[in-house]
Image (cartoon, grey):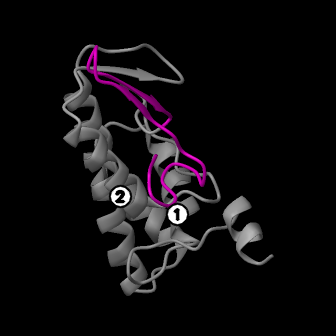
Amino acid sequence: MPEGNAHTGFDLYVFDASTRTVFVGDLVTPDYCPELWDPDCDLKGWIAALDRLDSLGAQGLVPTHLNPTPAAAPEIEKTRRYLTSMLAFLVEKKKQNAPEARVSGELVAQKVGGYCPRERSAINALSIYRRLLSDGTTRPGGAAAKSATK
């Protein structure tokens, strides 16, 4: 289980050592752009979860959505590369106090991450940018934020 938020505030993965297969929920979606708009999504936490997944040395990967793959490491890496480049881009824009229109415009021009459609990347970026702190962490906006105030 990831420590803290990743794709959502309630992510889970399971590793079957006998088959070297990892069941990843939505932490990795082979050949499909990650969705970053959950209000509790935290890119730093998600990247850390991917690092832990990668350290398992899994061969097979079974996501909640889409097809399983016998090549776990490349799929984990594609997701990590997208999230890492998105985070670096958004932290830089946050430091510049860039307006949202500039963020989405420059995002399209720079093709951040490489494999997501422009529209999805723009939705992803703005969903994170609105909650992003200068250190690259995000304020939770959903269930985690509500339970923290109780």
Q: Residue at x 20, y 30 (%)?
A: 73
Q: Nearer the viewer, residue 73 or 2?
A: 2
Within-10-Å neighbours for mark 2: few <14, some 14–19, many 20+: many
Mark carried by residue 128: 1
Principal secondary structure, stretch drawn in magenta = loop
Give the residue at mark 2. Answer: 86
The three-letter code of the residue at mark 2 reads Met
Q: Is residue 109 left or right of residue 42?
A: left
Residue 58 is one of the magenta-drawn residues? no
Contact flag, marks 2 and 1 (Cβ < 8 Å): yes
Q: Residue at x 48, y 80 (%)?
A: 133
The magenta segment:
1-26
Q: Is residue 22 left or right of residue 26?
A: left
Q: Residue at x 58, y 60 (%)?
A: 127
Image x and y of residue 137, in percent: 44, 73
Q: Residue at x 46, y 46 (%)?
A: 1
Q: Is residue 25 left or right of residue 88?
A: right
Image x and y of residue 132, in percent: 50, 74
Query: Does 96 appear above or below 58?
Result: below
Q: Quadrant of the C terminus?
A: bottom right
